[in-house]
Image (spheres, rainbow, N blue to C red):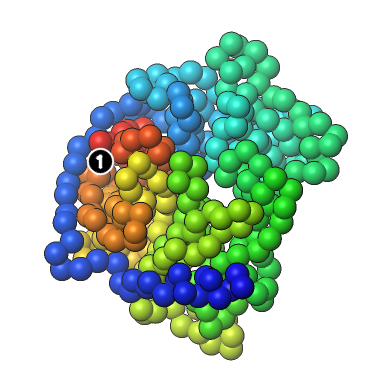
Amino acid sequence: MKNKCCFFISIFFLFGCKSENTQYEKISYTLLDDEIVTTMPGSLIVTSDYLVWTDPFARDYFVHVHDKETGGKIGAMGKVGEGPQEFITGGINQIAIDNCFFANDANGKTKGFLSLDSLVLNRETFVPLSDSEQLSRPFMVELMKGLFVGITNDGDSDYFRTNIKGNTSTFGRYPIPEVKQHVGGIFAYNPERDLLAFASFNFPYLVLYQKTGDTFRLLWERKSDGDEYEVADDQIIFDHTVGGIYEVCMSKDYIIALERDRDRDPMDESTVGRDVSKCPHTVFLYDYEGSLIKIVDLGIPVMRIAADCQNNVLYAIGANPDYVLVKYEL
């Protein structure tokens, strides 16, 4: 029954990214901090009071915290090292639950929580997992408390898997349905509307799902007509000169995709690498029905974006020419 339901709901397809009358707007930013020192920012996250960005190549602390309104630096946490409460290559979850981020080590064994409240109070920020948490915590992305989403294995019938308060299920179609192969991408979640967005960074693809009980149902998907890839010997071969969506986040009224406007900026994506000056300087604003509302030129090349669901403020890390932390009123 689940598959039949998804079929009828998901008939709404949108091919291509824009029409000739798509509105194009250029806006200015408010500078929050022009001293973002990093080789490459790993992620940007908005909480109720703070802006948080990570540095995967840090040598001291990999999580940096700023005041959300002023951009002022609050401090740093997540010590880099090989000790029992240190991280060789640290990363954090994309949401703060009870003002704590779940943190783990890609090249080590450290797992635990990093507390924003403790950072503000100048206390030890690392909180270790309990024995039960070590055993029970799903190895997936936590989108809100008790809600975990990940991907299945290539060839499985559905694309995603989920664990909602201990109840597991799978859902979702493959972006390129003729091949059951995962394409690489990023999640965004709107807890106010219980909506999950997924975008691929390998080709232009954006999909939206609605949380329903202990799983998700497809609402709509947007994808290109297939010029960015070919299928050969049951494998997807992407045209890496084109690429897809760099980042995706959701605000009060928009799904926001950091995406290159190829009509105005026909960059060869295979040449970008870590050169932030070659990153896109546009975001595509979609409404929650899947329509492209407008393309916004941010004025500088941008690598990371973040927003929350209470307003239409966009935060970004871009280059001018060095890394800067900025915000925009959309």
151 sits left or right of 236 in the view: right
Q: Is residue 292 left or right of residue 305?
A: left
- Position of the C terminus by quadrant: top left
Query: Which residue is painted at 52% across and 79% down in the image?
Result: 177
Label 1: state its secondary structure.
loop
Residue 123, how many percent across, how many down? 65, 13
Could you say which is closer to the camera, residue 139 or residue 33?
A: 139
Specify whether residue 120 is in view.
Answer: yes
Vertical order, 180 against 198 (above or below):
below
User: Where does residue 87 sit, x and y in percent of width and height?
Assistant: 69, 35
Residue that sits furthest to the right in the current view: 131
Q: In this view, does 241 lie to the left or right of 60?
A: left
Q: Quadrant of residue 158?
A: bottom right
Q: Hey, which quadrant is residue 261 in on the image?
A: bottom left
Instruction: Residue 297 in the image: state x and y as whole percent.
Output: 22, 49
Q: Where is residue 71, by image quadrant?
A: top left
x, y percent for residue 208: 45, 59
The quarter of the image holding the N terminus is bottom right
In this orientation, which residue lies closer to the viewer: 204 or 142?
142
Residue 81 visible in rendering: no
Q: Which amino acid does label 1 sit on?
A: Leu
Viewer-proximal residue, 285 or 77?
285
282 in relation to 221, above or below: above
Q: Disc 1 designates what residue?
A: 330
Q: Residue at x 81, y 31 (%)?
A: 130
The residue at 68%/68% (across/down) is 153
Q: Residue at x 70, y 41 (%)?
A: 105
Q: Residue furthest front?
A: 1
